Amino acid sequence: MPYPYVLLSAAVSLDGCLDDTGPDRLLLSSPADFDRVDEVRASVDAILIGAGTIRADNPRLLVNAPGRRAARRAEGRPEYPLKVTVTASGDLDPKANFWHTGGEKLVYTTEKGAERAARVLGDTADVVSLGPALDWRALLTHLYDERGVRRLMVEGGGTVHTQLLQQGLADELQLVLAPLFVGDPAAPRLFGPGAYQGGRLRLTESRRIEDVVLMRYEPTAPGAGPLPVAADHRWLRTACELAALCPPSETAFSVGAVVVAADGTELARGHSREGDPVVHAEEAALAKIAPDDPRLPGATVYSSLEPCARRASRPVPCAGLILRSGVRRVVTAWREPDTFVTAADGSGVLADGGVTVVTLPEYEAAAKAPNGHLLP
């Protein structure tokens, strides 16, 4: 099922602590970075924190800048993002700031915790049971399908960040490093022990903000192995978004494609009719990569529509171009219908050539959206 884009956000000391053990919250970010966080909050559909963070920090989780709230209203969005918390036990303080500031609130919990949370909160928040245990995939699916959340910002705590990374469900980590040491072994740390999916992270940005440093990372896969599940969803979403950029046509589908190396590096992207009235998306993307690029055999092609097996406008269809490139993995959202070519089977051609083809049908509606005029 499709999930929201999951952005983890945290600030830590030089020795990796989220806080100290004193009675007051340790402020790790600078004023300018707090403003950056406010900007990120204004850009998302929902903000999530664990119930432990509510108890420890008593945060409000607001968009503080009036101009940013006004911009959200002008876009037809709520003034504040949806506020979400997760608790297995349902142990929540109804007096906490979280419940009395901002807009809508949502609690995800277990069957056992749901009764307790509903009793304590009344009509202050919606309470959703995820079953006998907390299930992050079910939570993300519910946010996407039932609440329309496309971008989710996760602000803590360490247990929540750890679980999302370990399950390969994070799309981005925004980590701020503060120039101080906590030095207390009992202080809470950002990440806990355990096995993490995705291997070495890829640094996408490093920026000084007053006396702190912001580092942005994307999860990747170790070595030449497949990208994690979250990456497949992220890149296929991107391909579907690229399809919307295609010049309209009555005789060809609008398709987007992205070629991504095994380490998570984007090699190229393209869309149908990009600078050429007959070019296909996969063709446009692959043309931007040197044929002898050593990363191609380990790369994945993400295409909003199954690569074509036959075409009239070029001697080699996209499935053939992918085979020639050496790429051995393709992820797509939608099998090609018989609208222009009968018995199209690009996936079969690729599979016969040794390419692994993955179809994520939950993105079919997004892939079809710019092609509605061509479909029955």
Image (cartoon, rainbow, N blue to C red):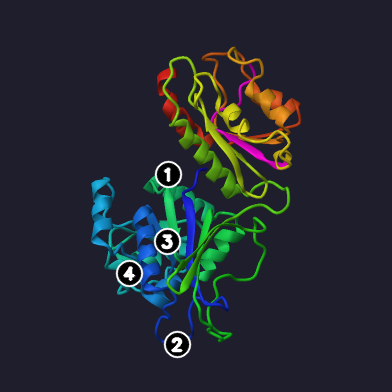
Mark 4 or mark 3, earlier in chain: 3
Q: Amino acid at mark 3?
A: Leu
Name the mark nearer the viewer: 3 or 1: 3
Name the mark nearer the viewer: 1 or 2: 2
Mark 3 or mark 1, earlier in chain: 3
Q: Is residue 106 above or below residue 376?
A: below
Name the mark nearer the viewer: 2 or 3: 2
Give the residue displayed 32% in from the left and 73% down from the top. Answer: 96
Q: Which residue is mark 1?
A: 145
Q: Who is closer to the viewer here, 264 or 128? A: 264
Q: Amino acid at mark 2?
A: Gly
Mark 4 or mark 1, earlier in chain: 4
Q: Which mark is residue 22?
A: 2
Q: Which mark is residue 109?
A: none
Q: Which residue is mark 4?
A: 60
Whole-percent x and y of residue 373? 40, 20
Main secondary structure found in the magenta portion? loop
Q: Amino acid at mark 4?
A: Arg
